[in-house]
Amino acid sequence: MPRSAYERSKGVETVTWREFPLGKGIALAILDEASATGRQQKGQALLDVLDEAAGLPPCKLTVADRPQRHRTREGRLELKTYGYYRIAWESTPRRGSIRIYNLTAIRQQVLAPKVFLETLLHEWVHHYDFTGLELDRSPHTSGFFNRIRDLAETLGVGYVAPPKREVSSAAPPEDVMVAKDHLRPGGVPPPKWIRDQVLALFGHPRT
């Protein structure tokens, strides 16, 4: 019986490279950048290096100079989104894109450099899961977080990716979208505010 995406994700702890990714200098330069434009340019350069070294199709980065999407309850922050990964499931090759918000949710301050870089690496590992490991979902397993740490250490910036606990397999990641029907992997509809955001960014789905 074939293993589930959750089991496969949990069992892979490192990124497999066709060639060593020479991206340390770019990663360090990202840590010195604060503007949305500069982060998008340097971030895209790093994604290009990672995609080529891993033999993956290109992944496009957008850094939005706007506050993180968030939700409050009784005046307190309940949920915020650092960014998300979106994949065009039916395209050949599958096209991935990453969007990261450059300002914090409430205070609207520039996102800390380490947090920005960790978010970029986090979302790229989703790209690796779909287009490298060819999973049909990209859950936040212990293996997923180990792949982020392995990637960060490969780039010489392991300190930006502290250990994380995995999320239950019953809880699909909030930062992954599949363009085919705007469902997260696993078939669970995303929250309405994320669906509205997708429509605002990419328009209504074709019928």
Image (cartoon, rainbow, N blue to C red):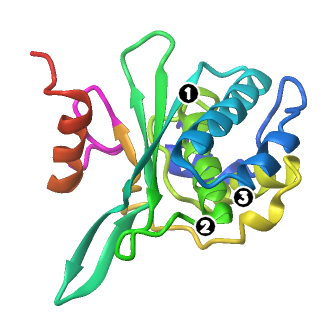
Quarter of the figure with residue 85 = top left
User: Can you name the residue that lies furthest to the top here?
Assistant: 92
Q: Is residue 33 visible?
A: yes
Observer-side mark, 2 or 1, equals 2
Asked which secondary structure carries label 1, the reply is strand
* Residue 179 falls within the magenta-colored stretch: yes
Disc 3 marks a residue whose amino acid type is Asn
Sequence order check, earlier mark of 2 and 1: 1
Q: In the image, residue 160 lies at what x, y percent?
A: 73, 64
Per the model, the C-alpha gap separating discs 3 and 2 is: 22 Å
User: Can you name the residue that lies furthest to the left here?
Assistant: 207
Whether 175 is drawn above or below 124: the answer is below
Q: Which residue is label 1 attached to? A: 59
Give, as a single range, the part of the protein colored magenta: 178-189
Asked which secondary structure carries label 2, the reply is loop
Marker disc for residue 9:
none
Disc 1 marks a residue whose amino acid type is Cys
Observer-side mark, 3 or 2, equals 2
Nearer the observer, 151 or 184: 151
Q: Which residue is label 2 attached to? A: 112
Whether 73 is drawn above or below 166: the answer is below
Quarter of the figure with residue 31 = bottom right
Per the model, the C-alpha gap separating discs 1 and 3 is: 21 Å
What is the chief secondary structure element of the magenta stretch?
loop
Left or right of residue 90, residue 204 in this image: left
Q: Which residue is at a point 74% across and 55% down the rendered structure image?
A: 32
Q: In the image, residue 22 lies at what x, y percent?
A: 88, 33
Q: Which residue is at a point 33% across and 45% down the rendered structure image?
A: 186
Sequence order check, earlier mark of 1 and 3: 1
